[in-house]
Amino acid sequence: MIIPIRCFSCGKVIADLYEKYIELIGTVREDGETMSDGDAMDTIGLNRYCCRRMMLTHVDLIEKLLRYNPSERHIIKDANSGRG
């Protein structure tokens, strides 16, 4: 959903680091290599494994949820049951 504000384990504020993390992933470093997830987290200062877990396992579903319209559920349900 939305990136958690704090790490669930240690309580460190991590939400403000998410956009910078996304920007850093895949950028090219000085040595010509693309920046890995671990390198990006090192750069923004996420050193604890619990905080790193929060960034790595986050799935951003907000765009899918914004397309969901609860009123359409009843229309589709009625159409499938033949009451349309």
Image (cartoon, grey):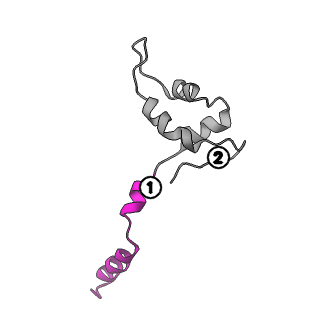
For disc 2, the marked residue is 6
User: As shown in the figure, which amino acid type bears the numbered disc 1?
Assistant: Ile
Residue 71 on the magenta span: yes
Q: Is residue 68 magenta?
A: yes
Taking the spot 33% from the left edge, 83% from the top edge, the residue there is 78
Name the one closer to the observer, 14 or 8.
14
Q: In the figure, residue 17 lies in which quadrant?
A: top right
Binning the other alpha carbons within 10 Å of mark 2 as few (below 14), some (14 to 19) or many (20 upward) gives some
Disc 2 marks a residue whose amino acid type is Arg
First reached walking from the N terminus: tag 2 or tag 1? 2
Q: Position of residue 33 (x, y in %)?
A: 42, 16
Q: Position of residue 70 (x, y in %)?
A: 40, 73
Q: What numbered label is drawn on residue 50?
A: none
Q: Residue furthest right?
A: 10
Residue 63 falls left or right of residue 17: left
Please tell me whether residue 45 is drawn above or below residue 66 in the rendered image. Answer: above
Which span is picked out in magenta? 61-84
